[in-house]
Amino acid sequence: MGQAMQAGIKAVADKLGITTQELMTDLKTQTLAQLAQSKNVTVADLKAAIVAAVKPLLDKAVTAGTLT
């Protein structure tokens, strides 16, 4: 799994207050929106957490020329 994907997964798990392993297990039976609702977290907050975690990695890759 790529670094950006791992960062996004960790950001979601952290925002929901669960481990990444728990997140992956829960995603087998629930959507992210359902998980967020069950943890009283908005989908907008999840999106913001993902962007905050992934954007710096993507920016770095663009600057390095490995992503265009």
Image: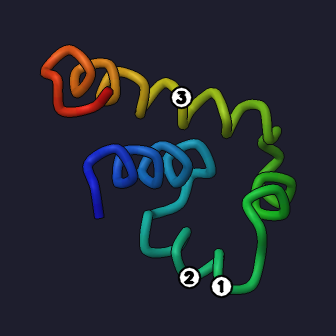
Give residue 51's mark.
3
Circle 3 Cα neighbour tier, 10 Å, few/some/many (<14 / 14–19 / ≥20): some
Q: Amino acid at mark 2?
A: Thr
- The quadrant in which the C terminus is found is top left
Mark 2 sits on what residue? 25
Q: Earlier in the sequence, mark 2 or mark 3?
A: 2
State the separation of the CA atoms marked 2 and 3.
23 Å
Tell me what residue is drawn at x 47 percent, y 43 percent: 11
* 4 to the left or right of 61: right
Furthest residue in direction front, as rendered: 68
- Give above or below for 16 relative to 47: below
Give amino acid for label 3.
Answer: Val
Question: CB atoms at circles 2 and 1 under 8 Å apart?
Answer: yes
Whole-percent x, y for residue 32 in the image: 73, 60
Report the disc number at residue 28: 1
Q: Is residue 42 left or right of residue 47?
A: right
Tell me if label 2 and label 3 are in contact, CB under 8 Å: no
Q: Is residue 38 left or right of residue 45?
A: right
Q: Is residue 8 left or right of residue 68?
A: right
Residue at (57%, 52%) from the top-left corner? 17
Type of residue at label 1?
A: Lys
Q: Nearer the viewer, residue 46 or 57?
A: 57
Quarter occupied by residue 63 = top left
Query: Which quadrant: the N terminus?
Result: bottom left
Mark 2 neighbour density, 10 Å: few (under 14) some (14–19) many (20 or more): few
Residue 43 higher or lower than 16, as above or below = above
- Looking at the rendered structure, the secondary structure element under dot 3 is helix
- Label 2 sits on a secondary structure element that is helix
Residue 18, position as x, y percentages in the image: 53, 60
